[in-house]
Image (cartoon, rainbow, N blue to C red):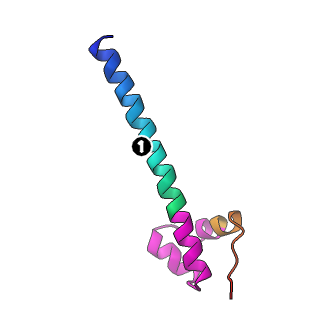
């Protein structure tokens, strides 16, 4: 195997690891958003804190079938 082939495989493995890390981070953010909403935090404030828009937050909450638990 040449150095160039090794570099390609290394880059591919690095990309795969990064994609897995992004997936884990998204799950964590989703859980944090759901928890904040269920604790009574307004969608607008969650959006502000996460740098997302309110539509994205509402869509996420709908996709996770989240409602406020009181």
- Residue at 30% of width from left, 11% of height from top? 2
Q: Quadrant of residue 4?
A: top left
Considering every residue shown, the one lying at the far top of the view is: 1
- Residue at 38% of width from left, 24% of height from top? 9
As drawn, 3 above or below 39: above
> Is residue 40 in the magenta section?
yes
Span of residues in magenta: 29-58
Q: Name the residue under label 1.
A: 18
Residue 55: x and y in percent read 62, 68
Viewer-proximal residue among 60 and 25? 25
Viewer-proximal residue among 55 and 1? 1
For label 1, count other residues whose C-alpha is less than 10 Å away and answer few (under 14), some (14-19) or many (20+).
few
Q: Quadrant of residue 57?
A: bottom right
- Residue at 42% of width from left, 43% of height from top? 18
Q: Is residue 4 visible?
A: yes
> Is residue 50 in the magenta section?
yes
State left or right for residue 58 relative to residue 16. Answer: right
- Residue at 65% of width from left, 69% of height from top? 61
Mark 1, secondary structure of its residue: helix
Residue 66: x and y in percent read 69, 72
Considering every residue shown, the one lying at the far bottom of the view is: 70
Q: Can residue 43 be seen in this view?
A: no
Residue 67: x and y in percent read 70, 77
Q: Quadrant of the C terminus?
A: bottom right
Q: Is the magenta stretch mostly helix, strand or loop?
A: helix
State left or right for residue 57 relative to residue 4. Answer: right
């Amino acid at each position: 195997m040449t150095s160039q082939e090794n570099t390609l495989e290394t880059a591919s493995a690095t990309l795969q690891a990064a994609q897995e890390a992004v997936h884990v981070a998204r799950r964590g953010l989703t859980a944090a958003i759901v928890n904040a909403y269920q604790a009574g935090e307004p969608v607008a404030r969650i959006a502000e804190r996460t740098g997302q828009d309110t539509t994205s937050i509402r869509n996420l909450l709908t996709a996770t079938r989240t409602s406020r638990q009181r």
